[in-house]
Image: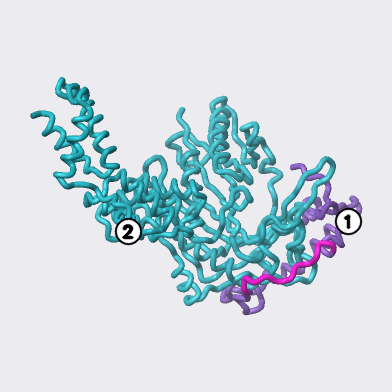
Amino acid sequence: MEIDISRLVKLARIELKPEEEVRLAPQLGEVLGYIDKLNELNVDDVEPTAHASPLSNVLRKDELGDSLCRDDVLRNAPESSNGLFVVPKIVE
Amino acid sequence: MEYELVIGLETHVQLNTRTKMWCGCANEYGSDSNTNICPICLGLPGVLPVLNEAALRKTALTGFLLNCSVPGYAKWDRKNYFYPDNPKNYQLTQLDFPSTVDGYVNFESLGEIVKVRINRAHLEEDVGKSFHFADYSGIDFNRAGVPLLEIVTEPDINSAEMAYDYLNALKIILEYGAVSDCDMEKGQVRCDVNISVRPKGQSELGEKVEIKNMNSFSGIRRAITYEFKRQVEVLEKGGMLVQETRRWDDNAGVTDSMRTKEDAHDYRYFPDPDLMPHRPSDEWLSAIREGVVELPLDRKMRMMSQYKIPHESADVFVREPLLGDYFEQAAKGVKNSKSVANWVINNLQAKLVESGTTIDGLTFSPAAIGELVDLVESGKISSKIAQEVFNEMFKSGVSPLDIIESKGLSQVSDTVQLKAFCEEVVAANPSSVDDFRDGKDAALNFLKGQVMKVSRGKANPKMVDDLLREMLVD
């Protein structure tokens, strides 16, 4: 199966060296080819579903629970300032 | 060539639940940054979001208010994109099985009742808020995960004015349903505008331009007016429009391009594996249906026909539902309900503003206003005295009848007494009497005023007029 590796790289926000692209593209193609086997199944009588589990209506009441303290919220942030997560300047 | 506008709106409205969509963190505006946060809000590995039942309920109720149907199956999907205000790198939304579909809104626009079809109102989550500094941006995730209803119209809107009227009508419907506070200042209502132009009569749609993330209705009206002009100019010059996303610069009053179709997002939607679908039961839906309130436009029409009030008055009662409810109680059993409306709008409302009180804080019952109107109608007091009684009633909460009796304010309609007042005034103002006899009608008004003064406002004005004429013509 053909893979547009440069597009995938862009979507996933990762960088690959050209030789990695050459190596990975066929490998990913093989994985997709393997999954493609599912297309051989006859699913005419099978209803589509979004979940394998038969559960539905898993709900909670609109009641306040515990939130984290701010130090914990920001603990894993590479950088923070004045209680905000610091990120590179957003310009769109 | 003549061109026409085709507009569709996607309106995002924050639901006023106590907690967020997937967790028990507070749905609260104005908290310290990053304090209403838990691992679910941050999308940390291994967390399990659970649907907030109140958000689903408010969504279904909105659906009913927008004449939508509520399908028996709804699910959630991941919309994948990278942006710093999006903690999970996907937004949970409803792609192909939304909670409500196929409705419409009727509203007034440019003096007519018009209809805009609703494609769907689906439930998703809000993202965080960014703050921009000189060399970095900062993110507050308090808003991330707040339930957000996206209400999508069909492209049925054909002018900036109609878009503006639709948005105002929608806002008041949502307020009636108490599903959202719709506070524009707090960013609780935001809108994406899809707009295209085409030569009049052409059935094919023009290239669609989307203006993103507008947060004021008047801004939207201006942006549409600007876009129409811009797009028509491009076409007139023989240019081509491209499908693109633009941004409205409210200060400059212009839109500029953010991205074109070539670099449009590829969201790679797929069903969220952590959230189970929702299958609303009949009992659940019928309980919600009980909360369906009278729509603003229906209320207006009903009030106009039931109480014979002009549409301006009905508009006030639609915009101010509490005042309207108060009016309806006051008008109960009163013959001149139009006069009750005037009292409520002109006197009561002004007095409330002046004294800084609310309707809940009033010390007299709505029926007292009805009583006051009946007293004027029956000629027991003049409308001038009624003002005085009203002021007293507003202060003390005492009923109009009691005020009139204790202060001796009843209108004097006794001929003998009125004659005495008139004779006194005629005797005291010989020059005005002469003026009137010389044909100056205005002099009579002066004399009438004097009689009212002598009677301390209690004389029946109609009778005074008759009596004076009778006396002076002889």
Q: In the image as oriented, which residue stretches furthest toward the bottom?
A: A54
Q: Mark 2 points at which residue?
A: B402
Distance Cα–Cα, label 2 vs label 1: 74 Å
Q: SS class of the residue under badge 2?
A: helix
Subunit under mark 2:
B
Chain in purple? A
Identify the coloring: by chain
Residue B102 seen in the figure: no
The image position of residue B230, as x and y in percent, is 57, 31
Labels 2, 1: one chain:
no
Subunit under mark 1:
A
| Corner quadrant of residue B243 | top right
Please identify, in this view, whether the residue under mark 2 or under mark 1 is nearer the observer. 2
Main SS of the magenta segment?
loop
Magenta stretch, residue numbers: A61-71
Amino acid type, residue under disc 1 in the picture: Pro
Magenta-drawn stretch contains A63: yes
The image position of residue B228, as x and y in percent, is 54, 34
Residue at x-position 17% and y-position 22%: B434
Question: Residue A78 got which mark?
Answer: 1
